[in-house]
Image (spheres, helix red, strand yellow):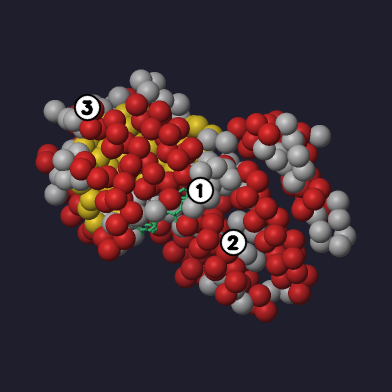
Amino acid sequence: GSRRVLVTGCSSGIGLSVAARLLMMCLLLSEVVVATMRDLEKRGALEKAAGDALNQTLEIKELDVCSEASIKECVNSLPDRRVDVLVNNAGVGMIGPLECQSTAAVKEIFDTNFFGLVRLVKEVLPDMKRRQSGHIVVMSSVMGIQGLLFNDVYSASKFAVEGFCESLAVQAMKFNIKTTLVEPGPVVTEFERKLYELAETMDLSKTDEETAKIFREMYLPYSKKIFTSLGQSPEEVSEQTFKLITTKDPPLRHQTNRLYTPMTALKHADPTGRLPLDTFYKMVFKHDRKLKCTKHLVRPGKENGKTSYVENVKK
Ligand code: NAD
């Protein structure tokens, strides 16, 4: 029968782009894409991208990764409950000083990014094992390998995702099920807009003045600059995700932005953790007492004519 790919979080960004990219293949191979989203009212962009493929090879279904009932309902609605490839993409970000986040908000990040994955895998893995085939593809992040300033909670949620998949992959392999963690650097999507929107409304009086200043005057402009200079398009990420789904022997991990590889390599180069810690500390704080570090962090590099701050890490 035809292969079925289920993607979560398809109303925008990478998920939307992955669904659209898969569609081109599925039309050729008569495979089926089940593009899911929490809020079906946001299906417009995907419908537009799908054109005539809608309802032939593309089905749009409701799925909230935070609700077990919603996941069950969606999977139960599929013929034989069959999901050959799960693309777990839905995710949310969080930036800012920890003191400014409520514990409830922190739990929400984990509920989507980590528990959302756990719920989905619990639902599809037993059937994949029975069929002795399947592929679990998970949108992680380079922050699932290396934590970054003011991304404590988000990074922790992606570390959880990485640990979960790394462990599960061994068992999955025994049942001929593949596992792939896709690790993008910054990608220009709604994700970024939502983060900065949240940062605008954050109550910085809940932290000390110095921390608030570092966040507002140094981190935010720096982070925005990184997105502008190094950010990939969702299409760049979906093209690579597409290749990972269609290749015969996909890797456990795939970084989409090679400019970030040196950053994640620091960790493996020094088991004491000093090398990455010192490097990030220097990058962020050392160059500059006036909190105007951006120009030291982002400076022209040689990679693809793009700006490369990773060049500085290598020193
Ligand atoms: P996005 O905000 O455009 O897309 C995220 C999607 O997840 C949205 O459509 C949102 O509605 C959906 N979603 C959120 N909660 C959900 C829930 N409970 N149930 C179902 N769907 C839900 O952002 P994006 O950049 O496309 O993010 C996609 C994935 O890529 C996320 O897992 C994110 O962590 C990861 N990622 C993003 C970046 C980046 O810089 N944008 C970098 C690395 C990794």
Residue toward you, 92 or 98: 92
Which quadrant would residue 178 be assigned to in this image? top left
Q: Earlier in the sequence, mark 3 or mark 1?
A: 3
The amino acid sitting under disc 2 is Ile
Residue at horizontal 19 percent and vertical 30 percent from the top:
30
| Spatial CA span between label 3 and label 1 | 33 Å
- Asked which secondary structure carries label 1, the reply is helix
* Residue carrying label 1: 158
Residue 123: image x %, image y %? 25, 46
The residue wearing badge 2 is: 95
Confirm whether residue 137 shows in the render.
yes
The quadrant in which the C terminus is found is top right
Task: Classify mark 2 as within 8 Å of ligand 1 or not, answering yes or no.
Answer: no
Residue 296 left/right relative to 90: right
* Residue type at tag 1: Lys
Q: Please, is residue 15 above or below residue 101 in the view?
A: above
Res 264 quadrant in image: top right
SS assignment at label 2: loop
The circle on residue 29 is 3
Disc 3 on helix, strand or loop? helix
Which of 9/82 is in front?
9
Relative to 270, 247 lies left or right: left
Q: Residue at x 23, y 32 (%)?
A: 27
Give the residue at the far top of this rendering.
248
Q: Amino acid at mark 3?
A: Leu
Comes first in the chain, label 1 or label 2: 2
Residue 28 in the figure: left or right of residue 227? left
The quarter of the image holding the N terminus is top left
Circle 1: is it few (<14), some (14-19), or many (20+) Cα within 10 Å?
Answer: many
